[in-house]
Amino acid sequence: HAKDGGKNRFSLFSHGMQEEVHYRLMIQRDLEPAILDNQLIIYFQPKVLAETGEVAGCEALVRWQHPEEGFLTPDKFIPYAEETPLIREIDYYVIRECCKKLKEWAARFDKPVPIAVNLSGRHFRSFKIVEVLKEAVASAGISPDLLEIEITEAVLIADPDKAQKVVHAIKSIGFTISLDDFGTGYSSLNYLRTLPIDIIKLDRSFIANIDTSEQDRRLTRGITSLAKGLDLTMVAEGVETESQLQTLLDLGCHCFQGYYFSKPVPETEFLAWHKKYNNALGNNHKVG
Ligand code: C2E
Ligand code: MG
Ligand code: MG
Ligand code: MG
């Protein structure tokens, strides 16, 4: 990307409030045309299963090729989009594109590769998202169990009762529900009581120091057995090194996502990675 080396947004934040206000307004102004003009790009990052080494699925992570600002990662625009209803349009776009990909991919893979999409908390104030999801899988002609819905505790902030009903409605169609950034919120355990969760994704802040922190190892071991006891799949996020992977395997984790396997990459790169990875697997390569 030609503009990657250009204006650096980190310097902006150190320049103070006024630039930030200006940047926010620009981002919010440019979002709507961006969606219409296909400037959003979906990257994919694999999840891998310990037992078999197989690819368990992938996560869709959006990026924005901005006409003047260059290639933007989510931290440069998602927080600003979250302040407006446009975040919902971004998520609708990602949902629809991923359903189309799932249809295209079906013929390529021996084993289906589900895609996980991230949903903003702003969807859970109405049932519109339920209709959008239904319509997206129906028009792509795919089964809803191929699409995973990642939510965070933000879903319950505005109206917990309503949000709970919306999540249950999504689940009842057959989508898999994943609780993202687990362990970082105030009431993670309460979520497990009130929401129909299938997967928890242990936040990468637990993994970052797992080799050096006995505390983090103990917490991770505890959360892993909690997940097992509740029949939930647990995914360890942000696995970057062989050593972290080995520690996590020793703690009983069985599903992983992180740079160690692959960074989020464009579709063609993801498909190439998948092929190469599966070939290696065929030659008796196993995780850990
Ligand atoms: P998330 O859903 O928790 O996604 C995981 C983030 O961790 C991604 O950042 C991913 O690139 C990063 N990551 C994965 N493995 C590693 C690793 O080994 N080390 C490190 N240091 N980082 C790793 P990314 O792509 O910048 O996305 C950031 C956040 O933006 C996501 O966090 C998600 O909350 C949000 N986001 C991304 N795409 C969408 C979207 O389509 N809709 C909505 N509403 N939010 C999105
Ligand atoms: Mg996520
Ligand atoms: Mg996460
Ligand atoms: Mg996150």
Image: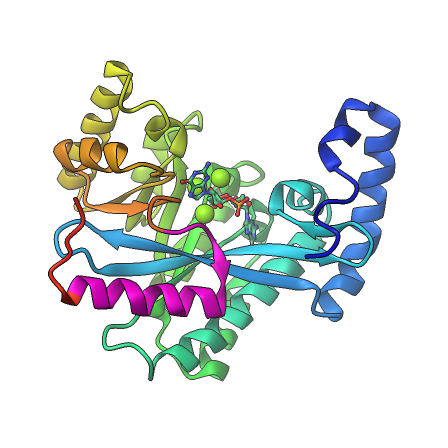
Q: Residue at x 51, y 76 (%)?
A: 135
One can see residue 39 in this view: yes
Q: From the top left corner, tell me how far across and down residue 122 is, in percent.
A: 60, 48
Give left or right: position of 282 versus 145.
Answer: left
Q: Nearer the viewer, residue 4 or 251?
A: 4
- The image quadrant of residue 245 is top left
Q: From the top left corner, tell me how far across and down residue 63 is, in percent.
A: 61, 55
Q: From the top left corner, tell me how far across and down residue 11 is, in percent.
A: 76, 29
One can see residue 113 in this view: no
Q: Nearer the viewer, residue 273 or 200?
A: 273
- The image quadrant of residue 253 is top left
Q: Nearer the viewer, residue 142 or 196?
A: 142
Q: From the top left corner, tell me how far across and down residue 277 is, in percent.
A: 27, 62
Q: What secondary structure characterizes most of the magenta part?
A: helix
Q: Residue at x 34, y 80 (%)?
A: 106
Q: Residue at x 66, y 44 (%)?
A: 82
Q: Give the extent of the magenta segment.
A: 262-281
